[in-house]
Image (tube, helix red, strand yellow):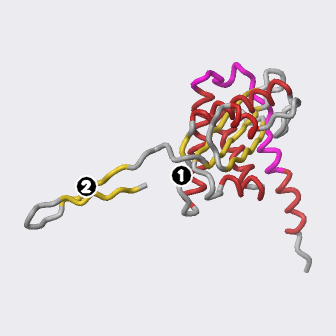
């Protein structure tokens, strides 16, 4: 007896793709305020860190400078309609990091676009897409990076949501922290443990 399940695979894939690429919501239907955009960027960070911690990796720290660069990249793509890691003048994220005088040892960029309605869903769709791509997933899950920034911009003409994630290995700027444990001893000394 022949199985008809093999014919359902392509149909299921088409349905999943159609669900993911929903018609763009109009501006009246969705909050596109600066606060809502920043909340969606933080949601992308939370989703990314959930993917990392699920696999035993440390969370990435948000870097406001990288967020600004990511927003610039997303805004460029939204305004120009050019979905690329390189801008029309030849500038890429590595040039932008250098121009911002940021000390870095390694960096990477991931980009995405979608037409998902609510911004939190757009963030989920972007992160799911990155996790579904081996080259993007490698950046998301790399133990090489310690900082990240996400940027979101919406094209006024098409409603497309353009995402950029800028990952970086840079000097640790968080500083050490100390934990003091009270040790019971004749002299009642304290042990200071430094964790990074």
- Disc 2 + disc 1, Cβ < 8 Å: no
In the image, residue 25 above or below residue 58 = above
Nearer to us in this view, 187 or 115: 187
Picture coordinates of residue 105, whole percent (x, y)? 65, 49
In this orientation, does residue 48 appear? Answer: yes
Q: Residues within 10 Å of mark 2 (few under 14, many from 20)?
A: few
Left or right, 16 with reference to 50: right
Residue 131 figure quarter? bottom right
- The x, y position of residue 79, in whole percent, is 81, 24
Report the disc number at residue 59: 1
Which quadrant of the rendered structure holds the C terminus? bottom left
Query: Could you say whether the residue bearing mark 1 is in a helix, strand or loop?
Result: loop
Please state if 185 lies on the left or on the right of 151 as rendered. Answer: left
Please name the residue shown 78% across and 44% down the image.
19
Q: Residue at x 61, y 58 (%)?
A: 143
Which residue appears farthest toward the top when viewing the image?
A: 28
Height in image: 88 above or below 156? below
Q: Earlier in the sequence, mark 2 or mark 1?
A: 1
Q: Is residue 1 magenta?
A: no
Q: Is residue 142 above or below residue 1?
A: above
Q: Quadrant of the N terminus?
A: bottom right
Magenta range is: 15-35
Q: Which residue in the protein does label 2 denote?
A: 180
Residue 27: say if magenta: yes
How far apart marks 2 and 1 lie (CA) works out to 24 Å
Name which quarter of the figure residue 147 lies in: top right
**What residue is shown at x 71% (from left), y 44% (from top)?**
125
Residue 62's x, y, as percent?
Answer: 55, 40
Q: Residues within 10 Å of mark 1 (few under 14, many from 20)?
A: many
Where residue 46 appears, as percent x and y from the top left, is 56, 45
26 or 184: nearer the viewer = 184
Please give the name of the residue rendered at 56% of the width and 49% of the height, measured from the top-left corner: 60
């Amino acid at each position: 007896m022949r199985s008809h399940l093999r014919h359902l695979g392509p149909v299921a894939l088409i349905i999943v793709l159609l669900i993911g690429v929903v018609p763009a919501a109009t501006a009246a239907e969705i909050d596109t305020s600066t606060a809502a955009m920043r909340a969606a960027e933080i949601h992308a960070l939370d989703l990314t860190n959930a993917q990392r911690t699920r696999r035993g990796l440390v969370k990435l720290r948000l870097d406001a400078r990288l967020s600004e660069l990511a927003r610039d990249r997303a805004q460029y793509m939204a305004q120009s309609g050019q979905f690329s890691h390189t801008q029309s003048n030849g500038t890429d994220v590595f040039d932008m990091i250098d121009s911002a005088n940021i000390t870095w040892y390694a960096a990477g960029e991931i980009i995405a676009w979608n037409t998902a309605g609510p911004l939190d869903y757009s963030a989920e769709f972007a992160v799911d897409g990155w996790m579904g791509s081996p080259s993007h997933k490698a950046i998301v899950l790399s133990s090489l990076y310690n900082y990240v920034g996400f940027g979101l911009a919406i094209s006024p003409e098409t409603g497309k949501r353009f995402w950029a994630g800028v990952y970086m290995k840079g000097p640790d700027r968080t500083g050490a922290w100390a934990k003091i444990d009270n040790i019971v001893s004749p002299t009642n000394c304290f042990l200071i443990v430094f964790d990074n």
